[in-house]
Amino acid sequence: MLSWIDSGKTILDIGCADGAFGAELKKKGNTVYGFEISKSSAEKASHILDGVVVGNIEKDTLPYKEKNFDIIICADVLEHLYDPTSILIKLKKHLKDEGKIIISIPNIAHSSIRRALLFGRFEYTDIGLLDNSHIRFFTLNTAKKMIKEAGFKIQDFDATTDFNKAINYYLNALLKQLRWSVFPGLYGYQFLFLLNKKTTNES
């Protein structure tokens, strides 16, 4: 995800948590604002980022100007929302014309989930793909459908895996070549998308 972000950008991190990721973005010379539902996390982030607002992305109006940001990040956020498509639409107006949204979402069709279903298991956990705070679940196809319905197009795509780093390095290289085939949908633990706004003449 960091490789998609250049320096000198104005960035909004939705669900910024304690600002740890934003701190990495600031090291690259970016101006980073955060929007966070947790007051305690927002308080920590406020000492790191250039400004933090406490709020609920689904209920509250965003206190930012239109076309204000070069990049908006939703890292592991959309799966916690009731209507993630409407949130992407809501965020769009705050992007500059050439702005981008970066999203990451877990893959419910990961091989580990498929194996569990074969044995009749679908058990929520404290963390991971079946985190008990997840409201929405995505496959690669449903993620692409959401992106299209929200009026974005995919500029780049990646998939992380839960293999060890050595295997992960070579597998990710393979996934990039086979990015829309079965492999990311089966072995991708998490999907990452770099999105552009569609122009008015794009379907």
Image (tube, rainbow, N blue to C red):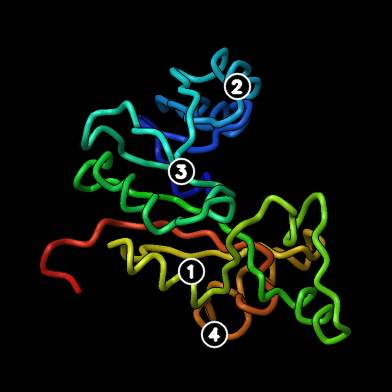
Q: Which residue is mark 4?
A: 181
> Height in image: 157 above or below 53?
below
Measured in 3D between alpha carbons, the distance from the residue under mark 3 to the one under mark 2, in whole angstroms, is 19 Å
Left or right placement of residue 182 versus residue 89 in this view: right
Residue mark closest to the camera, 3 vs 2: 2
Q: Nearer the viewer, residue 104 or 30?
A: 104
Residue mark closest to the camera, 1 vs 4: 1
Q: Which residue is mark 3?
A: 73
Amino acid type, callout 1: Ala
Q: Residue at x 39, y 50 (%)?
A: 87
Measured in 3D between alpha carbons, the distance from the residue under mark 1 to the one under mark 4, in whole angstroms, is 14 Å
Disc ID at residue 143: 1
> Height in image: 73 above or below 167?
above
Q: Residue at x 54, y 81 (%)?
A: 178
Tag 4 secondary structure:
loop
Q: Which residue is mark 2?
A: 39
Q: Nearer the viewer, residue 65 or 8?
A: 65
